[in-house]
Image: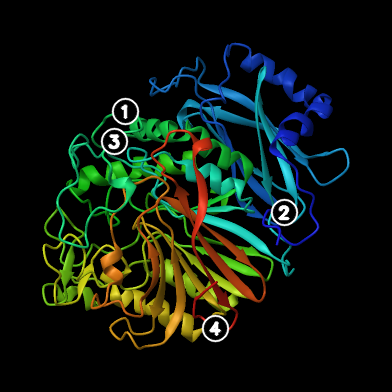
Amino acid sequence: MSGSHFGAGRTRISRRELLHGAFAAAAAGMVAPARSLAATGAGVKSDPFQMLGAASGDPLPDGVVLWCRLALDLEDGKRWGLAEDAYTVGWEIRDLERSGRPIAAKGNAIASAEKGYAVHVEATGLQPATRYAYRFTLGDYATEGVTRTAPAAGSMPDNLRFAFCSCAEYEFAFPHAYELMARDEPAFIVHLGDYIYEKTYDEFYRFDAPPPARRPGCENLSEGQKRARFLKYDRTAKVKTLSQFRRRYAEYKSDPRLQYAHRTCPFIVTWDDHEVENDYAADFSEVREAEDFVATRIAAYRAYFENMPVRLSVLPVVAKRRQLYRSFDFGNLLRLNMLDERQYRSDQACAKGLRGNARTLSLGECPEIESMIGADGTAREMLGREQSRWLERQFDTSKAVWNVLAQGVMMAAIDSRADCNWKEPRTETMIWTDGWGGYTVARQRVVDLMEKHRAKNPIVLSGDVHSHFVTRVLKDWKDQNSACIAPEFTTTAISSFLRNLEPWAAPGGGNARTIVDLDSRHHGYVVCDVTEESFDVTAKRITPSAILPDTASVRSETSYAYRVTAGDPEPRKI
């Protein structure tokens, strides 16, 4: 199977060919925009694209979002080293699959200080399942990339390859996984959140100290536990302001491996918690009073949408919240439902005042885990009512062979009684209250929706836990013998710290049928190869170690591979 495209018979075009051929022969096509750009870009004396690159995202059959952001100086949190309040940036997009690579669309866009000099272009009028090269220009400078549109509505692609990833804290390892994932030639990359981290880990770890002692079986087996700092970014303990969030995104996006991934295929993104604050829940902060936190959340959301290649025109703003949940159809082969499990959720069960909202608790300690009503007298929600109704419509109207839910935290209810945080394993069921397991009634609603609408072949994709997992979403989370409603595949971290979670799968750990497989020793990503007949999932690990600084010195290898056959939710090893 050729994994770089939808269907079969496409011509593979290298990045070198793109950069040195797609635009060189057609330079005359940019003359008119260049004259107008010269007046606004003449004062820019160095490349404003080099630091942050370009990206594409949210592919549709007839269009795609193009993104860039201008910057010359990351220390300047207001103008980023740029002299003017606004610049006119030229853009064009060329069809790579037609002779002569003709211009499919072009125009100008404004990069303004008010929006952090970010540019969003919603290119339309494109052909389905087609590769395009795109380019941004300002004065004498340009940046380029390649993207792809989705298959035509109602079509049935022969195959579809995509990848997904999450959790890219740069203090613990290098983000080699971004570049290696892109080299696997997915049609698109799904990012499930924690694209940035809002804090440093200085306050939690002494980087010059050895790992703490653990009980037998809980030794720190993963290379990611080595205490070393790799990213020299702003050491602000926690970013709170719009300027700080903009700088943090710029620091992350300056990494060449992330830039490579963005330039070579479109991203479809959602967030988890660290884009705002660890374990936050809607308006509930982990550590700060609500009024201060709401201002931080608004700034964080604004910076997120400025820096992500998302289709802003169709995402409404209601009560200072911009909708992020949305769906994408790849013909009748796959519907991808991108969920937002942070913005509308209730506070975690048995939250302890204004601090430490998320904890691991037993059902005896916290009956609220199983309650429909929270301590504040309101219904306990994970998705919120509007998003839940939207998801029901997606199930009800889908014609796809595969119906995928992509979101941040694990949906399978994991029993953490054997977790390495305990000095001795617990004897009762222990639930981490930040995941779907801490919202059991809300989770059951989603499971019931899958059954009610007989959604064909549901698949759940998750992140958050910094480990590869294959799990079963069971009809009754308390009954390990209940039916598997959907398989769930969870990706390890791009570069965040790793934990030894192997005891979760140990005999007597309470997860006999929930957990099928795991790898908690490596950084990496996941690749999915989809046909009408099967959904193949390959977990990739970075080896020998993601703490090596040079991408040329590492490679990706398979941790495990599983197949789900259409009509049967059971994941089987291949």
Residue 163: horizontal and vertical position, in percent? 55, 56
- Residue under label 1, please give it: 234
Q: Is residue 183 left or right of residue 26?
A: left
Q: Is residue 79 left or right of residue 182?
A: left
Q: Which mark is first along the chain, 1 or 3?
A: 3
- Residue under label 2, please give it: 62
Q: Is residue 463 above or below residue 553?
A: below
Q: Which mark is residue 568?
A: 4
Front in this rendered view, residue 250 or 65: 250
Nearest to viewer (mark 2 / mark 3)? 3
Q: Secondary structure at mark 2?
A: loop
Q: Is residue 350 left or right of residue 526?
A: left
- For badge 2, the amino acid type reads Asp
Question: In which quadrant of the rendered image does the N terminus lie?
Answer: bottom right
Nearest to viewer (mark 4 / mark 3)? 3
Residue 353, can we see it?
yes
- Residue under label 3, please give it: 228
Residue 310, can we see it?
no
Q: Which mark is first along the chain, 4 or 1?
A: 1
Residues under numbered marks 3 and 1 in contact, where contact means CB atoms less than 8 Å apart: no
Residue 133: horizontal and vertical position, in percent? 72, 39
Q: Secondary structure at mark 1?
A: loop
Q: Which mark is first along the chain, 1 or 2?
A: 2
| Whole-number angstrom distance, CA of label 4 to CA of label 2 | 33 Å
Front in this rendered view, residue 525 or 548: 548
